[in-house]
Amino acid sequence: MTILLLDPTGNVAKPRLENERALDSLKGKKVGYIFNQHKSALIFWNALEQEIKKKLCPATVYRIYKENTWAPAPKAEVARLVSETDYALVGLGA
C-alpha cells in the first residue's frame, strides 16, 4: 500500500475584472437568468420571473436553466449571457 501526500497549497487564479457598466434603470433592459432548477425554489423562481416581466418589461430574456443541479453552468453559456444581457439574476448556486 502506498500513501500519496499532496501539497494543498497552490496558486489561486485571479479573475479578470471587466469594467462595470452602471444602469440608470432595469426597466426595458435585457435580462439574463441562471437557475439550477432545484425543486425547493421552482415556485419562487417562476414567480420572480413573472414579477420581473410585469414590473420591468425586459426587452429580451436569456435563460440558462441547468440540467444538473450540482454542476456549474457551462462557461461558454455564461459568457454568452454576460455579453448579450444588461443584467442577470443568478439563483441557488448556479
Image (cartoon, rainbow, N blue to C red):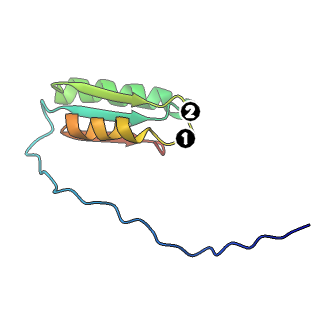
Q: Position of residue 33 (x, y in %)?
A: 34, 34
Image quadrant where one finds the N terminus: bottom right
Q: Residue at x 74, y 73 (%)?
A: 5
Q: Is residue 18 above or below residue 7?
A: above
Left or right position of 12 against 48: right
Q: Between 39 and 30, which is closer to the camera in this rendering?
A: 30
Residue 59 is situated, as x and y percent measured from the top left of the image, at 15, 25
How many neighbours does mark 2 have within 10 angstroms: few (below 14), some (14-19), or many (20 or more)?
few
Write down the quadrant of residue 77 in the picture.
Answer: top left
Residue 4 in picture, x, y percent from top left: 77, 70
Q: Residue at x 37, y 41 (%)?
A: 90
Q: Which residue is mark 2?
A: 68
Q: Is residue 49 left or right of residue 57?
A: right
- Asked where in the image residue 76 lies, by quadrant, the reply is top left
- Where 18 sits versus 64, above or below? below
Q: Are marks 2 and 1 in contact (CB under 8 Å)?
A: yes
x 45%, y 69%: residue: 12
Q: Secondary structure at mark 2?
A: loop
Disc 1 residue type (three-letter): Ala
User: Which label was assigned to residue 71?
Assistant: 1
Q: Quadrant of the C terminus?
A: top left
Under mark 2, the amino acid is Asn
